[in-house]
Structure formats: structure tokens, C-alpha cells
């Protein structure tokens, strides 16, 4: 029973005081992610994969070409009681007879091309050089397509606008008047202030000249006989400031909201 009691009051407080209506953002976020973020991630992934493959095996060591006396090794050598950097001791270590020299594997450039490694000291195998060329140009083409899709439409639209009109209306005529959908599909911008601790927003304008259904929400009525406009008086800030006569219409400190409804709507 205690758990149900706590859960009931927790949900009631959150529903009445904390939770709010989700913002109407539409599909713009998913469109932006699909057009920019996801596409950019694919292009960056392709470029990174091509660079990583070109830099393999990441040792910065190249085979010495034949006839280079600076790094020539005739035979392998044997060393005993070798201490590694990790502290481990080895009884014997035999060096390789293959001569190697330092080379900068980060100079593959973009697009990745085996020719950037030079001709004297190379670290790529024949198959690696072939695939590096393919991967490099694929990543370059993807980058060009991404840039064209990102800026091509805007540049084309700008150039066309210099010679002819390019505006095209979006949507279509639904054959429905604004007044027909008041309170259902049609609402107006009515100045109001949302403050914590109040069940409903606080209006900051005179609403006597508009249809109350344009506000977008209705207060709780204890007396059903009260007129629709009078029911908002407890939520309207204009009644917190003293004014002369019986109407606050002429006071300029609040916004003016007015509706000009067609004649047929008043019939």
C-alpha cells in the first residue's frame, strides 16, 4: 500500500508540476543527421581506413635497397644476457640479417598514393600498393561527392537566381479556411508566460477581441455558466494592474491581440 501511495503522488506531482509538452520539432533533426552527420561519418571513415591501410605495418622501418652501404648487414649477430625495456632478461637474442632503415610512414598524403613513400625506401608490398591506390581514390571521390551534395545545390540555386525566379510554393491548397479549424487545427500566437508553480500559463494581453479557442488551452471551470473569456481572468496578468473604466484595452503596457473574423463565421 505504501509503495502505491508514493507512486501515485510522485506521478501526480510530475504530471501537474514538472512534465511539459514535447516540442514540435518535426523531422528536421533526422534529416540533418541523415544529410550531414551520417554522410560525413561515412566519408571520414573511408579516408581513415585508407590512411591506416597505407601506413601499415606502423613500424616506420623500410627495407634498404641493394647497394646502400649505410644500412648494409652481412650476417646476423648473437647477443647474450639482453635486458629489455620492460625489465625482462633474455639469455640470447639473434639479430636479423635483413637491413632496415627509418622512414616516415605518415607521408602518404591525400589521396593516399604509394608514390608518396618514395622510390629508395619503401614499406609497402606490391599488393598493398595496389589496394592503397584503389582505397585512396575511392575516398577522394567520396569526399568530392559529399562536398558537391553539401554545397552544390546552394551554388546552383544562387547562380540560377541571377537570371530567373526560382521560388516554388510548398504544399497545396487544402480548401479549408483558417476560421473553420479554430481550436482544432488553427491557433494563434497569444502572448503568455510559463512560470513554475502555476498550472496554466499566464496570459499577458487582452483576449476580449479574439476567439478564446485560438489560445490553445482551456482552464478548469468550476462554474459552467461563466463565459469563455471570463474563465481566463484568473490566468491573465492584465487584471493584476489597476485600470480605470471597465476595460483594460487602452493600457499600452500589454500586447494587443485582435481577430478580424469573416462575416459568415458570425452567423
Image (spheres, helix red, strand yellow):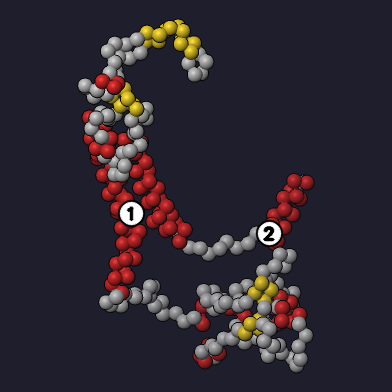
> Could you tell me how far apart the alpha carbons at marks 1 and 2 are, in whole angstroms?
43 Å
Q: From this viewpoint, which residue is outermost toward the front?
A: 70
Residue name at image x 54 percent, y 91 percent: 267
Q: Position of residue 14 (x, y in %)?
A: 69, 57
In primary-sequence order, the first of circles 1 and 2 is 2
Is residue 133 placed above or below 66 in the rendered structure? below
Which of the two residues, 36 or 207, is positioned nearer the viewer here? Answer: 36
SS of the residue at dot 1?
helix
Horizontally, is 113 left or right of 90 in the view? Answer: left
Q: Is residue 209 visible?
A: yes
User: Would you call the spot at circle 1 few (<14 residues within 10 Å), some (14-19), or many (20 or more)?
Assistant: some
Horizontally, is 33 left or right of 214 in the view? Answer: left
SS of the residue at dot 2?
helix
Residue name at image x 27 percent, y 29 percent: 121
Q: Is residue 135 visible?
A: no
Q: Position of residue 92 (x, y in %)?
A: 42, 7
Q: How many marks?
A: 2
Is residue 12 placed above or below 189 in the rendered structure? above
Horizontally, is 72 left or right of 91 in the view? Answer: left
Residue name at image x 29 percent, y 11 percent: 75
Is residue 183 placed above or below 54 in the rendered structure? below
Residue name at image x 60 percent, y 63 percent: 21
Which mark is nearer the camera, 1 or 2?
1
The quarter of the displayed image where residue 240 is located: bottom right
Q: Position of residue 34 (x, y in %)?
A: 40, 54
Q: Which numbered dot is residue 18?
A: 2
User: Would you call the spot at circle 2 few (<14 residues within 10 Å), some (14-19), or many (20 or more)?
Assistant: few
Which of the two residues, 40 or 171, is positioned nearer the viewer here? Answer: 40
Read off the residue under disc 1: 146
Is residue 46 placed above or below 145 in the rendered structure? above
Amino acid at each position: 500500500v505504501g509503495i502505491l501511495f508514493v507512486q501515485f503522488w510522485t506521478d501526480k506531482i510530475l504530471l501537474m508540476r514538472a512534465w511539459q509538452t514535447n516540442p514540435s520539432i518535426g523531422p528536421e533533426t533526422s534529416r540533418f543527421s541523415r544529410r550531414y552527420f551520417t554522410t560525413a561519418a561515412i566519408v571520414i571513415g573511408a579516408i581513415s581506413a585508407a590512411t591506416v591501410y597505407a601506413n601499415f605495418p606502423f613500424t616506420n622501418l623500410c627495407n634498404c635497397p641493394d647497394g646502400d652501404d649505410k644500412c648494409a648487414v652481412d650476417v646476423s649477430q648473437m647477443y647474450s644476457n639482453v635486458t629489455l625495456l620492460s625489465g625482462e632478461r633474455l639469455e640470447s637474442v639473434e639479430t636479423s640479417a635483413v637491413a632496415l632503415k627509418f622512414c616516415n610512414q605518415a607521408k602518404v598524403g591525400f589521396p593516399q598514393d604509394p608514390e608518396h613513400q618514395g622510390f629508395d625506401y619503401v614499406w609497402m608490398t606490391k599488393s598493398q600498393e595496389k589496394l592503397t591506390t584503389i582505397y585512396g581514390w575511392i575516398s577522394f571521390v567520396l569526399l568530392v561527392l559529399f562536398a558537391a551534395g553539401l554545397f552544390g545545390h546552394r551554388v546552383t540555386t544562387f547562380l540560377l537566381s541571377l537570371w530567373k525566379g526560382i521560388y516554388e510554393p510548398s504544399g497545396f491548397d487544402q480548401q479549408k479556411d483558417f476560421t473553420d479549424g479554430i481550436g482544432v487545427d488553427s491557433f494563434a500566437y497569444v502572448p503568455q508566460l510559463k512560470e513554475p508553480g502555476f498550472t496554466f500559463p499566464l496570459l499577458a494581453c487582452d483576449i476580449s477581441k479574439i476567439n478564446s479557442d485560438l489560445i490553445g488551452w482551456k482552464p478548469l471551470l468550476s462554474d459552467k455558466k461563466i463565459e469563455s473569456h471570463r474563465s481566463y481572468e484568473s490566468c491573465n496578468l492584465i487584471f493584476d494592474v489597476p485600470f480605470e473604466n471597465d476595460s483594460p484595452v487602452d493600457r499600452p503596457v500589454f500586447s494587443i491581440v485582435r481577430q478580424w473574423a469573416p462575416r459568415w463565421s458570425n452567423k
